[in-house]
């Protein structure tokens, strides 16, 4: 078939190109946990990596391989590995590639649960530094001889800080550090990761990829850039194949197989079908987010709005350069003295809920929920005010969203 360029064309035909039986456009959702063979040698070949067939669904299955192939193709990457959730992908990757005595640099602006996992890593003897990822000098100062990975989100939430992939990636390359990017906020439609010096991508498919809040999933993508011969923690038993495969094999065997955070084939099906409209949903949601950000920044009750699509955002230019649109997450703080809970309670359409990347617009009081465990001191150091609200903007008609915001604000 002729190579096509358009993102959605590539996406909606990706499964069919893998030739499911009977001309089906969706790969059948297989429920077999085990896979049996006619001869012992065939099973031995699967175990010893000479065959790409399947042995046991905790490691792989035809459904899982199909979505992995689609994601690898979309990201123009080397290989992908699916997990039961975004957190499973992220934590399994770290546990499979790190050992006690290693050092990891994390962006200070990360998802609350990732921040909590950083504490777990330190309990296992892994040294961690948290840095302002928008400040290259601070990153340089944090680098040590035993630094193995640098982890950053593409656009952080709730404050929407942006990682400069070229700048940070080049620095990592110089120091032989694996650059890991969580691109949950900017999945493949918004970010062409193959254009940047990014080594591994981690994405929560639960969010924009699936888009319908009906299935959890996560993926680790090896972009095929890092020379794993330079990484000291690859076990000799996984150094048998092509060098490009070393890390993904170790993550699969030591991580997915041994720790078991595998995705179900039903989730794979829901996520693949959901993903077909990713570009359409994101176009609409990002458009809505920009309109809402402008509305809020002109409102008398609103003190601050954080959205990279606004010219007032300190990294507005970088946002335009790196991403197709500035995302659909924004945060805002009403003036002091206004209780954000009252405002949220006055919404009739916008849902009060955690999660992001859904088709529906969601609002959450930040300090009291997703950043509650952190405590007020850390929050204020991060610039998170006690009455900040995060919006995950959905695909509703924007007039209805503006009307809901306007009516709630007018009740204050
Ligand atoms: C939600 C989220 C995760 C975790 O994904 P789950 O699928 O919910 O486990 C990781 N990183 C970011 C940036 C997220 O928003």
Image: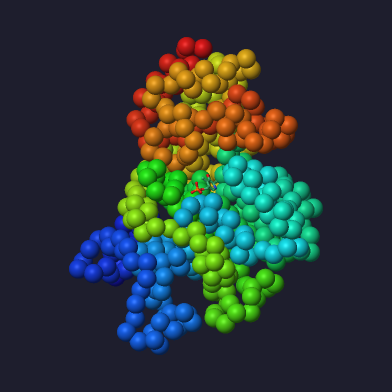
Between residues 156 and 252, which one lies in front from this camera angle?
A: 252
Please tell me how many numbered marks the rendered image carries. 0
- Pick the quarter of the image with the N terminus: bottom left
Determine if residue 13 is in view: no
Location of residue 34 with respect to 195 vertically, above or below: below
Residue 227, horizontal then vertical, whole percent: 62, 72
Side of 242 where 124 appears, left or right: right
Location of residue 78 with respect to 206 vertically, above or below: below
Measuring 34% from the left and 81% from the top, which residue is drawn there? 37
Using the rendered view, name the quadrant where residue 121 is placed.
bottom right
Location of residue 72 with respect to 213 vertically, above or below: below
Determine if residue 154 is in view: yes
Using the rendered view, name the quadrant where residue 72 is placed.
bottom left
Measuring 47% from the left and 12% from the top, which residue is drawn there? 410
Residue 87, horizontal then vertical, whole percent: 54, 51
Between residues 201 and 163, which one lies in front from this camera angle?
A: 201
Residue 31, horizontal then vertical, whole percent: 32, 63
Residue lying furthest left in this view? 22
How is the model colour-coded?
A: rainbow
Measuring 71% from the left and 35% from the top, which residue is drawn there? 378
Between residues 411 and 100, which one lies in front from this camera angle?
A: 100
Measuring 53% from the left and 57% from the top, which residue is drawn there? 89
Side of 195 where 132 appears, left or right: right
Residue 363, horizontal then vertical, whole percent: 48, 30
Between residues 162 and 106, which one lies in front from this camera angle?
A: 106
Side of 70 where 25 appears, left or right: left
């Amino acid at each position: 078939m002729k190579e096509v360029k358009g993102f959605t064309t590539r996406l909606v035909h990706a499964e069919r190109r893998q030739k499911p039986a009977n001309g089906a456009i969706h790969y059948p959702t297989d429920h077999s946990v085990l896979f049996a063979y006619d001869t012992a040698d065939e099973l031995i070949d699967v175990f010893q990596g000479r065959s790409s067939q399947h042995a046991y669904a905790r490691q792989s299955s035809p459904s899982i391989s199909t979505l992995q192939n689609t994601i690898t193709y979309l990201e123009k990457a080397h290989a992908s590995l699916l997990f039961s959730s975004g957190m499973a992908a992220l934590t399994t990757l770290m546990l499979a590639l790190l050992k006690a005595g290693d050092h990891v640099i994390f962006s200070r602006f990360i998802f609350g649960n990732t921040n909590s996992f950083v504490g777990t890593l330190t309990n296992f003897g892994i040294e961690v530094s948290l840095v302002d990822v928008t400040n290259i000098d601070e990153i340089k100062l944090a680098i040590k001889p035993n630094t193995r990975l640098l982890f950053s989100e593409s656009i952080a939430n709730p404050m929407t800080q942006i990682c400069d992939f070229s700048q940070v990636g080049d620095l990592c390359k110089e120091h032989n550090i694996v650059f890991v990017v969580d691109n949950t906020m900017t999945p493949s439609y918004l970010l062409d990761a193959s254009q940047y010096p990014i080594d591994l991508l981690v994405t929560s498919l639960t969010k924009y990829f699936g888009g319908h809040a009906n299935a959890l999933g996560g993926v680790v993508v090896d972009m095929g850039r890092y020379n794993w011969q330079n990484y000291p923690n690859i076990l000799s038993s996984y150094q048998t194949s092509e060098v490009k495969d070393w890390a993904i094999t170790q993550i699969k065997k030591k991580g997915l197989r041994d720790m078991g955070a595998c995705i179900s084939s039903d989730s794979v099906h829901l996520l693949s079908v959901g993903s077909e409209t990713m570009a359409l949903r994101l176009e609409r949601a990002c458009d809505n987010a920009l309109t809402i950000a402008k509305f809020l920044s002109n409102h008398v009750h609103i003190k601050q709005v954080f959205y990279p699509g606004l010219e007032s955002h300190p990294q507005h230019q970088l946002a335009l350069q790196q991403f197709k649109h500035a995302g659909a997450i924004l945060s805002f703080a009403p003036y002091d003295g206004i209780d954000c809970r009252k405002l949220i309670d006055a919404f009739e359409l916008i849902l009060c809920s955690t999660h992001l990347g859904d088709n529906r617009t969601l609002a959450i009081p930040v300090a009291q929920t997703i950043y509650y465990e952190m405590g007020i001191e850390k929050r204020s150091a991060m610039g998170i005010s006690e009455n900040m609200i995060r919006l995950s903007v959905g695909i509703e008609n924007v007039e209805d969203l503006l009307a809901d915001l306007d009516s709630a604000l007018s009740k204050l």
